[in-house]
Image (cartoon, rainbow, N blue to C red):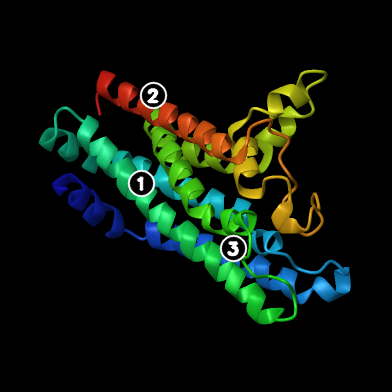
Amino acid sequence: MHLVASERIKLFSIATPWVCGLVALFALAFPAAITALSAGESRLPPTVASTQFGYQLALVAVLVLAALAVTGEYHSGTIHGTFQAVPSRTPVLLAKAALVGGYAFLLGEAGAFAAWLVARTLAPDADLALDSAADWRIVAGTGPVFALAAVGGVGAGLLLRHTAGAVALLVGYPLMAENVVLLIPRAGQAIHRWLPLNAVTKFLSGHGEANAGRDGGNATVLSDSPLSPGWALAYFGAFAAVLLAAGIVRVKRRDA
């Protein structure tokens, strides 16, 4: 607990978590408001799924936060003092991942429910009640997804160490890389089905039950992952754990 408290003081003494947190909240709430207000013009009534339209941009903010929580220490040099205090390194890195993951969980839950509430306030006649497991999963499931993504982001930061490289990777991958894979002749579709963000989309959106069965429209395009929602989350969590473990191994084998 002392390590977590120490990491909390270091993390929240800088602007990064506050700025990234506000960006994540805004990225979820603002598109929900626009979607609710424009539903009449598009003739697509808002659904519970469409209230989470900004999920991907908010995820990018969380990934950047996780990477900067690591690379910022390397840039400032404070990581040297941390490793002198905890020579084995692993406990402090696990504490950092737990702290960042916990903060990402809170951001995900607060942002997702805020987006849903904004849409329900602006479109009171729409059917936005959380009256099914699929509805609850696509809203309340954002927190666990963000937490696991943040753990993976910490691992990526440990592997790369440099802010520019880590940010470029964690911005480019969710916004572009998995879609580019689809362009690979013959094998692209098969590979894409097993990519981590595509898989975790299956956890959140399932078969589109929370979006009136629509695929796309004014909500996230459905995943083609062959996994069930529960296994999709576990699969995504395994990727995050592997990234973190690889980052810790690299840090233990090299000088800070």
Position of 87 compared to 155: left or right? left
Q: Give the CA distance from mark 1 to mark 3.
A: 22 Å
Secondary structure beneath disc 3? helix
Q: Nearer the viewer, residue 254 or 208?
A: 208
Q: Tell me the quadrant of the picture where the C terminus can be found.
A: top left
User: Which amino acid lies under the numbered mark 3 shown in the image of this protein?
Assistant: Leu
Secondary structure beneath disc 1? helix
Can you tell which mark lies on residue 204?
A: none
Comes first in the chain, label 1 or label 3: 3
Q: Report crowding for label 1: few under 14, some 14 to 19, many 20 or more residues within 10 A (C-alpha).
A: many
Reading the image, the residue beneath label 2 is 246
Image position of 198 with respect to 242: above or below: below
Comes first in the chain, label 2 or label 1: 1
Reading the image, the residue beneath label 3 is 28
| Residue 37 pos. (x, y %) | 75, 76
| Residue 99 pos. (x, y %) | 31, 49
User: Which amino acid lies under the numbered mark 2 shown in the image of this protein?
Assistant: Ala
Residues tagged 2 and 1 counted as in contact (Cβ below 8 A): no
Q: Report crowding for label 3: few under 14, some 14 to 19, many 20 or more residues within 10 A (C-alpha).
A: many
Q: Give the CA distance from mark 2 to mark 1.
A: 17 Å
Q: Give the CA distance from mark 2 to mark 3.
A: 31 Å
User: Which amino acid lies under the numbered mark 1 shown in the image of this protein?
Assistant: Ala
Which residue is rendered at x = 87% and y = 74% of the image? 41
